[in-house]
Amino acid sequence: ARLSGTGCPRPYNPTLSKKQFRSREIERAMGRALDREEFEVWYQPQHRLSDLALIGSESLLRWKSGTLGQIFPDEFIEIAESTGFINELGAWVLERSVRDTQSLPTPLSVAVNVSGLQMMGNGFVDDLSRVLHDTGFAPSRLCLELTETVLFDGTEDLVEKMRDIQFRGVSWALDDFGTGYSSLGYLSRLPIDKLKVDKSFTLSLGSDPAAEPILTAVGDLCRGLGMTLLCEGVETQEHLDFLREHHFAEAQGYFFGKPMPYPDFHAYAEREKAK
Ligand code: C2E
Ligand code: CA
Ligand code: CA
Ligand code: CA
């Protein structure tokens, strides 16, 4: 580490790591990105396993920055959370997702990711009410996804908000199930309608002998709790066969389709309707 000198103003912070530097660049570009219409919502199909019908989609953010190029959500969501920009961005994603889904040829559901920070903020319930009111979208077609980590340090206040939202007819999915390190006890206390088993379990079917017993046990757990089970990361026919054989309810993954821009998902829904 270099000495910081004798109090002279420095043109830059020499201890800023590459990662911090990148974060600051992203932070700066992000502020203008909504106005510049650089964000897009892409949609990934979700299918019911009993008859393979298309039932809805998950909306996933994409950002093509004019200055930094394509940046994926795994990198920018965290930064948007740290600056508070996630509230504005999250409200935009919600409205975009609902309006797009309304314009599809069949009445599909849509699952929107919600960050824990967004839930902590004061505006979320209002944003949600406004979108549902302005669009007239049936709340039963909307699912909100929260990750385990969020719930783990979730306060009573958070649970209260979740109940309030569920009371309005919107459902809750617990995302990336199995990757956190929380106890199972909270599952019965929280207003959760659906478990989304993390894709790492599906993807290790066939290579890791533990994957099968874990997935079957999660299947039983879900049935016992009266929750719907959705498996992520379904990439192959073998994955699909296993899940159908074990009566899993729903699936999502590259086998059906990758996340795609709205016009492509519209065409996908048209094709599914014609089947
Ligand atoms: P996630 O919610 O767990 O989303 C699933 C991720 O897995 C997506 O990555 C998706 O493209 C990828 N995926 C889907 N099917 C398959 C598959 O069959 N195989 C493999 N290997 N991967 C698959 P993506 O789009 O890069 O999103 C990453 C994460 O960023 C999401 O994880 C979510 O936590 C977050 N995110 C995305 N959009 C939003 C948003 O609008 N708001 C918030 N708060 N978070 C978002
Ligand atoms: Ca998700
Ligand atoms: Ca997930
Ligand atoms: Ca994830």
Image (tube, rainbow, N blue to C red):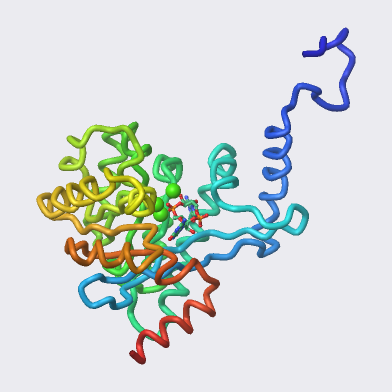
Residue 126 seen in the figure:
no
User: Looking at the image, which is closer to me, 233 or 184?
Assistant: 233
Relative to 194, does residue 4 appear above or below in the rendering? above
Q: Position of residue 181 (x, y in %)?
A: 32, 32
Which residue extends farthest bottom? 274
Picture quarter with the C terminus: bottom left
Q: Position of residue 154 (x, y in %)?
A: 32, 35
Relative to 69, does residue 120 appear above or below in the rendering? above
- Residue shown at 45%/63% (left/top)? 59
Q: Position of residue 37 (x, y in %)?
A: 66, 65
Picture quarter with the N terminus: top right
User: Looking at the image, which is closer to me, 91 or 13?
Assistant: 13
Relative to 27, does residue 58 appear above or below in the rendering? below
- Residue shown at 34%/37% (left/top)? 180
Residue 140 seen in the figure:
yes
- The part of the image, by quadrant, that contains residue 257 is bottom left
Which residue extends farthest left? 224
- Residue shown at 17%/64% (left/top)? 247
- The part of the image, by quadrant, that contains residue 127 is bottom left
